[in-house]
Amino acid sequence: MRRRLFSRGYEVFSRAEDRVIAGYRAETAGGARGRVLELGAGNGLNFARYREARVIALEPVADMLPKARARATEAPVPVHLVRGVAEALPFEEDAFDTVVVSLVMCSVPDPAGVAAEIRRVLKRGGQVRFFEHVRAHDPRVARRQDRIGPLYTRFTGGCRMNRDTLTVLRLAGFRIRYRRLYHGPKHLPHVIGVATPS
């Protein structure tokens, strides 16, 4: 029941949020090429942004899948939905040209495990395209994230606003090109960029 309520609330919130971040979704998903894995596809708001891709979309929450399926049928590229978790990807090594992670790494239980799995399934020469909110660069803002983080996590389905995703990706063996974004509250800075295996 709690999951179902969250899924309904997420649909309303994410559609409102999409008016602000649509351009970042388009940059992240729209630049994906070849065989693409999208992690944490949620309700499928990225699907309309793909252009030159064949997408496998992984989502762990069953209640998210009906909306995602509906959006998959309207997508301009083939999208195949798979239920599963990012810490144990049901795919062979070197299976994907691109992996897309959009507002996902903040909420996975084991970010280092997810990064390792991404590295495993990504082809040599492939790329990870990411759009994530992360731990603030400013120490004062980061301390504020630490203070309000536990309450925020309770009401956002497990999102940890102070997670240092850039460091997680680097430690997994990725080179990163990114830029910081401050389009919302100071305690919710975002990054957008591309990671490639080093």
Image (cartoon, helix red, strand yellow):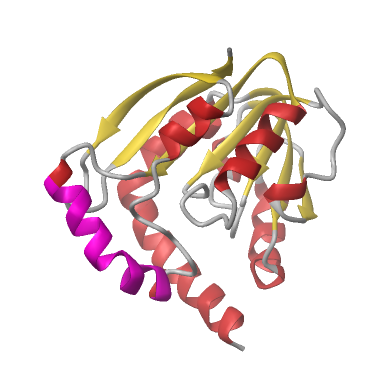
**Above/below status of 112 relative to 14:** above
Q: Furthest residue to the right?
A: 92
* Quarter residue 182 falls in: top left
In x, y percent, where is residue 40?
A: 61, 52
* Quarter residue 50 falls in: top right
Question: Is residue 147 magenta-colored?
Answer: yes
Question: Is residue 13 magenta-colored?
Answer: no
**Above/below status of 114 relative to 15:** above
In x, y percent, where is residue 125?
A: 67, 10
**Nearest the eye: 106 or 95:** 106
The quadrant of the image that shows the N terminus is bottom right
**Above/below status of 41 relative to 24:** below
| Residue at 64% over, 67% down | 64
In x, y percent, where is residue 34?
A: 72, 21
Q: Furthest residue to the bottom?
A: 1
Q: Which residues are magenta?
A: 140-154
The quadrant of the image that shows the C terminus is top right
Evaluate whether residue 26 shows in this view.
no
Looking at the image, residue 97 sits to the left or right of residue 190; the answer is right
**Above/below status of 122 relative to 153:** above
| Residue at 57% over, 17% down | 196
In x, y percent, where is residue 150?
A: 35, 70
* Quarter residue 164 falls in: top left
